[in-house]
Image: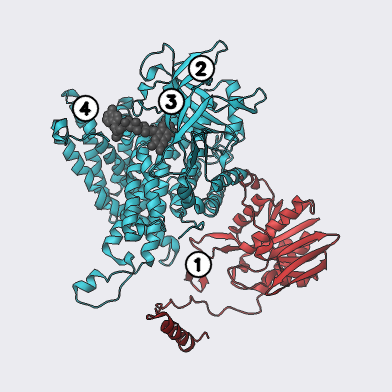
Chain colours: A cyan, B red
Amino acid sequence: MSEELVNHYKPDERDILFLLFEQFRIQDYLGKAPYDAFGEDDARMIINEAIKFTTREVGTLNSYVDREGCKHDPQAGTVTVPPLMKELQRKYEENGWHLLRAPEEWGGQDAPHAVSLAVSEFFSGACAAWAMYTGLTLGAARLIHTFGTEEQRALYCPRMYGGEWMGTMCLTEPAAGSEVGRNAATAVKNDDGTYKITGTKIFISGGDHDMTDNIIHLALARIEGAARGTKGLSLFIVPKMRINDDGSVGESNDVICRGIENKMGIKASATATLNFGDNEACTGYLLGSEEHKGISQMFQMMNEARIGTGMQALSQASSAYLNAVGYARERVQGKPFADIATGKRGDSVTIIHHEDIRRMLLEMKCKVEGMRALTLKLAAHGDRAAVAGEGSEAASKELGYVELLTPLVKAYLSDQGFRVSELAIQVYGGYGYIKDYPVEQYCRDIKIQSLYEGTNYIQSLDLVGRKLNQGGGALVRQLAEDITRLVKEHEADEVFGSDAKALGEALGHMTGTTMQFMKFFQEGQHQLIPLAATRFLEMMAEVTCAYLLLEGAVIAHEKMQELSETDRDYSFYAGKIHSARFFIRNILPGVKMKAEVIASRDKTAIDIADHHFPMVGAD
Amino acid sequence: MKIVVTIKQTFTTEAKIAVDGGAISDKGIKQIVNPYDEFAVEQAIKIKESGGAEEVVVLTIGPERAGEALRQCLAMGADAAFRVWDDSLAAPGAWDVYATVLAGALEKMKPWELLLAGWVAVDDNAAIVVQRAAETLGIPQVLVVNKLDVGDGKVTAVREMDGYREVVEAPLPALVTADKALNTPRYPTLPNIMKAKRKPLTVWTLEDIGVTAGSAGFTRTGLALPPAKTGAKIVEGEPEEAAVALADLLHTEAKVI
Ligand SMILES: Cc1cc2nc3c(=O)[nH]c(=O)nc-3n(C[C@H](O)[C@H](O)[C@H](O)COP(=O)(O)OP(=O)(O)OC[C@H]3O[C@@H](n4cnc5c(N)ncnc54)[C@H](O)[C@@H]3O)c2cc1C
């Protein structure tokens, strides 16, 4: 069944427009350099057309690409993608969507990040596996745009931004997963200034495919004699195919795909094992002109990719949630509990009427909306920094927010996105487990997000080890000040008073926990820090989401006053208020509990010896 | 040759309709270009692309927000847009008034050779306004067209009916209204979305086009949502018996056969 191409992707256009234009008010900076070409009407029309395109042309292929997957030909060392996905890529480029985020210098539109990120939710939500190819290409192209020599920029940027060639990021090796410093790929300088690259990279997304004639790998490798660890790594441009002097594609550059992974989800995204230089004929070009800068250069792409990863999780979770709402409105099963309890013999009802289903739907709703607010807030801060101008004090304050929110967006969205998609299955009951319905695929496709681009633990270390201390704690202080202002404004308020107070208290627990970290450090109890890091990231994300949901609810409440109950927007605004309340009253209380656990200095997980776990090995 | 396409901004057919103060509430409802008008716009652009026309302009009667619909047409490839509005036009369903206004605007936009429009608007299903305007202008009209050729001062159109097809010719200037088999409307490309705002969009008042709207020859006296659907009935039993029972119900209860 369901072999035909049906779109199940449901975009939440209203919530996105709310966040952009009512809550974060991006129209206040649109029209200003560098976004002088973009007005509110442009942004709205772009969103509108992107929804049309994704629901008609992209979402229809999501289960098809999942079924088809990618195929590896071991003889030829090549990978083919589902044919209709190639066709989709062509349509995507024909319609110019690949130009949205590309710099003007290379024919792009250089759209504000808030707009391009909002739009990327539609593309990724409609077909995550496919959207990854263009996302990675954009990241790789931007690396060359930022760090490349003039010749490198002129050769690669127009072709990569223009869609002619795609790109990848190659960090991972069999011995180098989270520990990037164990990279064993080597680079030996040739007489002509190029490098001979040798090594094996694994798990490379988009590492091989037949969508473009060439693939430009950005690969980390260690130049002969360079230091150990990450500081000895350099970043190389390694094309799959050699490039002739006239820019045309030539012979193989000895980058061979040895296989692709058989995975849980994102099946149409080829996860490739790449052998570089098996025949000693792989040429790499140092990105830019400085050696040993690889890791800091790669971090530009990583940061961008981390935000994209969070967005990808959100996009799937949101559609899973909306599909669950749609299903719950149709499925008739069970009589109302109140009828049973009072002995009334009522009719069976649609499941959206059951208390437990409403609990799940509202949990999904408030999490998805909180997560989206977090992401678009991050993007708006980035845009405001660009408008303020590089190097200005205002810009560095805005960028501080971007840095603080990046690990939250990556880790919280991927963890909770997975849980939201799992709840969506629960709402469907047994049907959710069946491939005729879209939610099981969302759940499988989402899971990768907590793993790649640095596992979520790595994100929590970034938060606790780096971001908390940055500028002597300035980033967290800024966040706390903004939250406190909202709390103060509304704690005496009739409508939101108790919720504002609860937010204030949760914030106290969060900032209190940052003090705990200092104490652990001073007391030499170092192991308590990584033990608490993941939990702390969740606390901070929950406090920030609650803050943004409350801020949204206040706006919604004001706007509702001018509307009548039959207006569609009235229902939307009422829904926003319920989201904030549910989150604050049902999820935020967990912050206090986590703070207490962390403060209790419980070390059970450290005290338990290896051999206290069953003595099983990996098979 | 110049082609004028008349379009209408409507709410989406999926939109949940709410009635507020005797009119359909447009608050929070998504507005689109009437889908049949998109076929007309696409056709006009195609004719221009194949060298059959120099200019494509779109025209609508509508309040400020209808500018979004015009902009979509500009982003699809139209060269210029015109919007006529007067607050007196807000009264619902005044098709005869709209036809007068449309004829006035089309008169002012002369010279043009081809007038294209969707055959019907999905919001009121009237299929009357542009047809009446063509009547006023005294030009031939070929309606609900599936295939269209333009050249040698005439249009040649194919109309599909149940079981047969008809080929019709008419001299220019003429009105042709589009059915959905005519073409597949393109999406506005991203670069064209950004370019659209630099294309001219002119707003006219009734005075500008020299028309007194007058009042409609009829008034809407009621507007109500259909009664809520009552529960479906499932006929149980063996297939043969169930089929007989179902036919019986369709005859006696639903009264459809
Ligand atoms: C589908 C897919 C696509 C991918 N795409 C790419 C790509 O395009 N490019 C690329 O370079 N890589 C890619 N990767 C690789 C991915 O980034 C790595 O899998 C990831 O970084 C984790 O590395 P690992 O799998 O070796 O896990 P490990 O590093 O072995 O981690 C195992 C577990 O140990 C934990 N851990 C590791 N170190 C520590 C520590 N110091 N302290 C505490 N806990 C620790 C981890 O959090 C994790 O829970 C992809 C992977 C997959 C599955």
Give the residue type at disc 1: Ser
Q: Are marks 3 and 1 on the same chain?
A: no
Residue B148 falls left or right of residue B65: right
Q: Are marks 1 and 2 on the same chain?
A: no
A429 relative to A121, above or below: below
Q: Is residue B113 visible?
A: yes
**Dot 1, how many residues are within 10 Å of its Cα: few (below 14), some (14-19), or many (20+)?**
some
The outermost residue toward the bottom is B252
Q: CA distance from mark 1 to mark 2?
A: 68 Å
Q: CA distance from mark 3 to mark 1?
A: 62 Å
**Dot 4, how many residues are within 10 Å of its Cα: few (below 14), some (14-19), or many (20+)?**
some
Q: Report the mark closest to the observer, 3 or 4.
A: 3
In percent of the image, x 79 and y 70: which residue is there?
A: B140
The outermost residue toward the front is A75
Residue labelled 3 has its Cβ within 8 Å of some atom of ligand 1: no
* Residue holding disc 4: A518
Q: Position of residue A461 (x, y in %)?
A: 30, 30
Give the residue type at disc 3: Thr
Give the residue type at disc 4: Met
Q: Position of residue B84 (x, y in %)?
A: 67, 61
Residue B245 sits in which quadrant? bottom left
Q: Is residue A457 visible?
A: no
Label number found at residue A200: 3
**Quarter of the image where the C terminus of chain A is located:** top left
Q: CA distance from mark 4 to mark 1?
A: 58 Å
Q: CA distance from mark 2 to mark 4?
A: 47 Å
Q: CA distance from mark 2 to mark 3?
A: 14 Å
Q: Check whether the beta carbons of the residues at disc 4 and disc 1 lie within 8 A of each other.
A: no
Question: SS of the residue at dot 4?
Answer: helix
Q: Check whether the beta carbons of the residues at disc 2 and disc 3 lie within 8 A of each other.
A: no
